[in-house]
Amino acid sequence: MNIEIKEYMHRLGSAARKAGHALARADTRQKNMALNAIASFIERDVDALLEANAKDLAAAEAAGLDAALTDRLRLTAATVAQMAEGVRQVAALPDPVGEMSDFSYRPSGIQVGKMRVPLGVIGIIYESRPNVTADAAALCLKSGNATILRGGSEAFHSNQAIARCVHEGLRFADLPPAAVQVVETTDRAAVGELITLSEFVDVIVPRGGKGLIERISREARVPVIKHLDGNCHVFIDDAANPDKALAIAVNAKTHRYGTCNTMETLLVHEAFANYILPELAERFAAKGVELRGCGRTRAILGDRVAEAGEEDWSTEYLAPILAIRVVKGLDEAIAHINHYGSHHTDAIVTEDYSRARRFLREVDSSSVMVNASTRFADGFEYGLGAEIGISTDKIHARGPVGLKGLTSEKWVVLGEGQIRE
Amino acid sequence: MNIEIKEYMHRLGSAARKAGHALARADTRQKNMALNAIASFIERDVDALLEANAKDLAAAEAAGLDAALTDRLRLTAATVAQMAEGVRQVAALPDPVGEMSDFSYRPSGIQVGKMRVPLGVIGIIYESRPNVTADAAALCLKSGNATILRGGSEAFHSNQAIARCVHEGLRFADLPPAAVQVVETTDRAAVGELITLSEFVDVIVPRGGKGLIERISREARVPVIKHLDGNCHVFIDDAANPDKALAIAVNAKTHRYGTCNTMETLLVHEAFANYILPELAERFAAKGVELRGCGRTRAILGDRVAEAGEEDWSTEYLAPILAIRVVKGLDEAIAHINHYGSHHTDAIVTEDYSRARRFLREVDSSSVMVNASTRFADGFEYGLGAEIGISTDKIHARGPVGLKGLTSEKWVVLGEGQIRE
């Protein structure tokens, strides 16, 4: 069986590489034509998509899948319409491929600049969320990359139904259907093959739980753009505007609990803690947020706050729980964030110019903010149009990864016959 | 012994991580002060450096090292002076760290942009060339990265002597000596440890033979910026200016034989082959270049050209040998290059606007050129000031890697108390 899977994935890879070359040559008009056609076919086929999804939902129910997972798996007429609209939005984004920049003349007489190019073939491994199939296909197509999609097995029928719309759209625009391939087996061995297909796959984007992503990163023989966890901080400085501090801290924690850009630890300047913590505790209590604090926090808030253990500082709760620590000032805040944080998104609330500058420079995270909620760390909010994920890696792409993150730049040299002396 | 090496490399890694934080905070003035001091100490210690180098040369002679390797290993008063000058040139380059760009307001009211930041800790594994020790240390220091250098064991004493100058320079500028660490063992196990120290090392740059680089890439658990080989092409179109074609083809092949940006295969448009090949063959014969051609080339040049086999199209000769193929035109040239090439550097010689545009777009190489010699693919020629290597990877950095290639960008959000609704 593994031999069969190996051969099957090799075939997918080889076809993707070939399709990738065609896609890299495709012009903007042709790619947009495919995207708009895909959106139309998704809308046209709403009944077939819901029918395929019903099969997946029935199997999920029989297998006793939990409510949150089933919820992610479920398609409705409204979410299908959103999916189509998302694909149209990607069509409307500027095409990054072929962008040329930074051309300057060198003393030798050559003119040197850069051209943005696709990465080639992108493998995406994701959970059982059918909408990701359409989103990821659209972003890869627009950025000129062929893609091999391997979604969660619970969404198998839904993904295959979406794939049919995608293929029809590609053919409509005279692009090879192999530009987007959805793996047609639920055998887990396919993932192991995909992440080691270095001959045909240029980058892997894994999405899902931390354990899965760590395992994929460890075993991959292809570069991985990954997101591990989001242990985000807000530091309230003693030069903070208290209204901004309260609004940002509450928003960063309670706007949504399950997202990677949600604040998990609040740091408060010791000269401001007595003043701001009681009001904050009241607001969090009103939202039902459990507080876990350091000794100094507990000295101020008493039994409104539980005792935080060492592990709390590095925990991504993804729940209505918040760790709070009182710090001596900016240095301790930065040291805490760089030590315990996940280098995702961290914010300072302050009106002090020099401390804001130092925080921005010295906090080693993919997003650093002054006087804004960590919840803004998002491809749409940053103006990328869409995102394939948020990278906590340092090389290639940090933070929200949009179309540009799926491309690279090559050097272009324009000459008039120059040779090197 | 391996336990000892493991512990030793772990200590280096941990110290590098700490020093990296200090270096990321260091300002331009402080880094330049260190670099200029290092240059001065290298000049001051020229006798000690030559003495250490003499030890390495004696050992190399005793071990029967070949002439080319011994040549790379040798330092002279002149090369030591060049080394110091190279470090000063890096001091004179603009500091990429902290560069901010692309700030724009979003509908939410936040202002979003990017800040250039160091990668963190860079591990460099290289052959027995002592000058690389100073070059690499300087580039990493300027870009705010701590570095762990593991040079070839034949250069052990030379590298340690250079390291002493580097450490003195770092201390002079009040920077931690652990910002540049030269591995103090020749045990090969140290390399295996370095490339798997994912806790402390952010990227590995291997330099040397293809076999070594492939092995390191396979075994590394840390991202690798690598250069495999340079199988570069020049395509002479039938719309080429013949003078430019002759000059570029001869320069690309014969300017230097052993460099990665040297042309290894020449492609000639069939409508131009009869006209240009005899003259080219004469010029190459005068330089002592052996020609290996396809059937059509041999039909034109007769016994001046040997028969090229399939393997010639993918060989990086690094020698006065050239493969020549007559092609039907642009499509076949592009297909040949993308299939057999190493995605390093490829050039077209043509006066045809549309073909030049297509070549630039469709050739999937880190450098693509029109009417210029492939020998220009170089960090100095491109204006990077210096290079740590030439990447044939697609993600993160393609082509010559200078200071910017040793950095990444984080997102910066500036707000006035914005929260997400």
Image (tube, coloured by chain):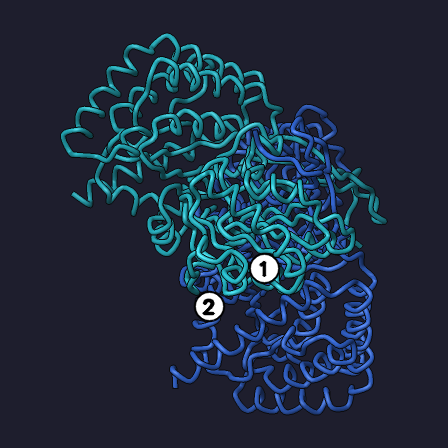
Chain colours: A cyan, B blue
Task: State which chain disc 1 sits on.
Answer: B
The residue carrying pointer 2 sits among few (fewer than 14), some (14 to 19) or many (20 or more) residues within 10 Å by Cα, namely many
Q: Which residue lies furthest to the front in this view?
A: A302
Contact? badges 2 and 1 (CB < 8 Å):
no
- For the residue pair A175 and A53, the one nearer the viewer reads as A53
Q: In which quarter of the image is the C terminus of chain B?
A: top right
Q: Which of marks 2 and 1 is nearer the N terminus?
A: 2
> Vertical placement of B11 versus A181: above or below?
below
Tell me where residue B77 sits by quadrant: bottom right
Q: Residue furthest top?
A: A44
Pointer 2: what residue? Answer: B197
Tell me where residue A331 sits by quadrant: bottom right
Q: What residue type is labelled 1?
A: Leu
B214 displayed left or right of B47: left
Q: Rounded to the nearest whole Å, what is the CA distance between mark 2 and mark 1? A: 34 Å
x and y, in percent, of residue A232 in the image: 52, 49
x and y, in percent, of residue A362 in the image: 67, 58
Let me know if marks 2 and 1 both belong to one chain. Answer: yes
- Note whether residue A214 is visible: yes
- Look at the numbered disc 2 and give the secondary structure of its residue: loop
Name the residue at 68% across, 76% down: B176
Pointer 1: what residue? Answer: B318
